[in-house]
Image (cartoon, rainbow, N blue to C red):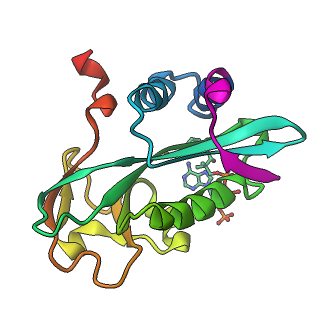
Amino acid sequence: MEIRPFTASDADTVSEVHRRAFDGRTDESRIVQRLHDADEAVVSLVAVENDRIVGHVLFSPTCVTNNPDNAKLAGLAPVGVLPENQNEGVGSSLIEHGLVQCRDAGADAVVVLGDPGYYSRFGFERASVYGLDNEYGADEAFIVKPLTDGALDDVDGIVTYRQEFRLDED
Ligand SMILES: CC(C)(COP(=O)(O)OP(=O)(O)OC[C@H]1O[C@@H](n2cnc3c(N)ncnc32)[C@H](O)[C@@H]1OP(=O)(O)O)[C@@H](O)C(=O)NCCC(=O)NCCS
């Protein structure tokens, strides 16, 4: 399996990957498309197996209410793997490569709204421990992984995802 950067010609295939990964729902595909159109992906990676895209992950910039030193927090969302390719390490590989590339791109931490049982293996911990909250009312599902030493020392408040996530405001 190869992990490589998303390119514009992958757009239709990546939409289909998310639509199938998320049980036919199109919200995630639309969010991905909107973030790419707005050029607001910090990192966007595809997983390729036998010349076929089988998974995709995207990290986008977030805002935090109290962030005097302008720490950069990227939001991981969405990540999707084709149903027939799940549980083969594709998602883990996308996330691990993505975390490294986020740090290389200058991110200080990554947040996710997801299952802690899955994401704890990558070093994500409960975000509220760092004084970070979210706009969706999630508690233990809102998790964070610092990428640099002391990344979150002077940061707290509500983390807000990009407007491209607000599909109801279309
Ligand atoms: C979640 C997802 C990206 C994981 O990718 P993957 O390639 O299947 O996962 P990996 O092979 O790297 O890891 C497998 C592990 O993930 C767990 N897992 C898979 N999907 C999961 C989910 N939706 N929630 C929690 N854990 C999940 C498996 O139980 C397995 O755990 P184990 O290692 O303890 O046995 C993929 O299953 C998927 O696309 N799911 C549908 C879309 C989705 O829910 N995306 C995440 C929210 S943004």
Q: Position of residue 13 (x, y in %)?
A: 68, 25
Span shown in magenta: 1-12
Q: What residue is drawn where x is 33% and y is 32%? A: 165
In this picture, is 141 found above or below 155? above
User: Which residue is more in the foreground, 69 or 73?
Assistant: 69
Q: Is residue 145 visible?
A: yes
For residue 141, which quarter of the picture? bottom left
Instruction: Work out whether 45 lies above or below 26.
Output: below
Residue situated furthest right in the rendering: 50
From where the camera sits, is residue 118 visible? no
Residue at image location 28% in from the left, 39% down from the top:
162
In the rendered image, the residue lying farthest to the top is 170
Looking at the picture, how far across and down is residue 89, in whole percent?
Answer: 73, 58
Q: Residue at x 60, y 64 (%)?
A: 96
Whole-percent x, y for residue 54 in the image: 74, 39
Q: Is 49 on the left-hand or right-hand side of 22?
A: right
Q: Could you tell me which residue is drawn at 90 percent across and 41 percent down? A: 50
In the rendered image, residue 62, in percent from the top left (x then y), is placed at 28, 50
Q: How many marks?
A: 0
Quadrant that contains the C terminus: top left
Image position of 113 (left or right of 32): left
Q: Quadrant of residue 133?
A: bottom left
Q: Is residue 35 magenta?
A: no
Q: In this orientation, which residue lies closer to the viewer: 69 or 85? A: 69
